[in-house]
Image: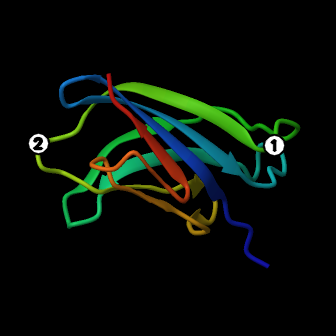
Amino acid sequence: MRMTAQIVFAGTFEEARGVWRFEVTVRYKDKGWDLYEDLWPVSDPKGGGAITERVLPHMHEVEQPTTRSLGGVEIPNGTSPVTVRACRNIFGYGGSEVLVDLTVRKQDGFEVTRP
């Protein structure tokens, strides 16, 4: 059975105009250093590829689900929605992802906060 990481929730906070912080909660079953979630990217689903990624340099075997943040993310004007998904060091991408519409306040799987 292929083990995949699941995005549980993505909180987004506009730090300044066009600059965002993402707080992403991921659930997965780390199996030690041989099998763990090692990053989550923020991507442009309209073909623009990864905007940035949050590297997770170590496993979180006992901390499940786990939430990590990444600030200073510059989202190009007019880019919405963005996709957040998780990657496992061996299996790659899979599991659930969240499509975050930065123009709305809240939907299933995400919340957007603006100053």
The one of 24 and 16 positioned closer to us in this rendering: 16
Q: Select label 1 or label 2 by which is in front.
A: 2
Q: In the rendered view of the protein, which quadrant contains the C terminus? A: top left
Residue 20, image x, y percentages: 32, 30
Determine the image quadrant of residue 87: bottom right
Position of residue 92 in the picture relative to residue 84 (left or right): right
What colour scheme was applied to this rendering of the protein?
rainbow
Residue 30, image x, y percentages: 80, 50
Q: Which mark is residue 90?
A: none
Q: Secondary structure at mark 1?
A: loop
Task: Tell me which residue sits at (84%, 41%) in the image.
Answer: 61
Position of residue 96 in the picture relative to residue 100 (left or right): right
Name the residue furthest bottom.
1
Image: 57 above or below 24: above
Q: Disc 1 designates what residue? A: 64
Task: Tell me which residue sits at (47%, 36%) in the image.
Answer: 54
Image: 109 above or below 62: below
Q: Secondary structure at mark 2?
A: loop
- At label 2, the amino acid type is Asn
Name the residue furthest left.
77
Q: Which mark is residue 77?
A: 2
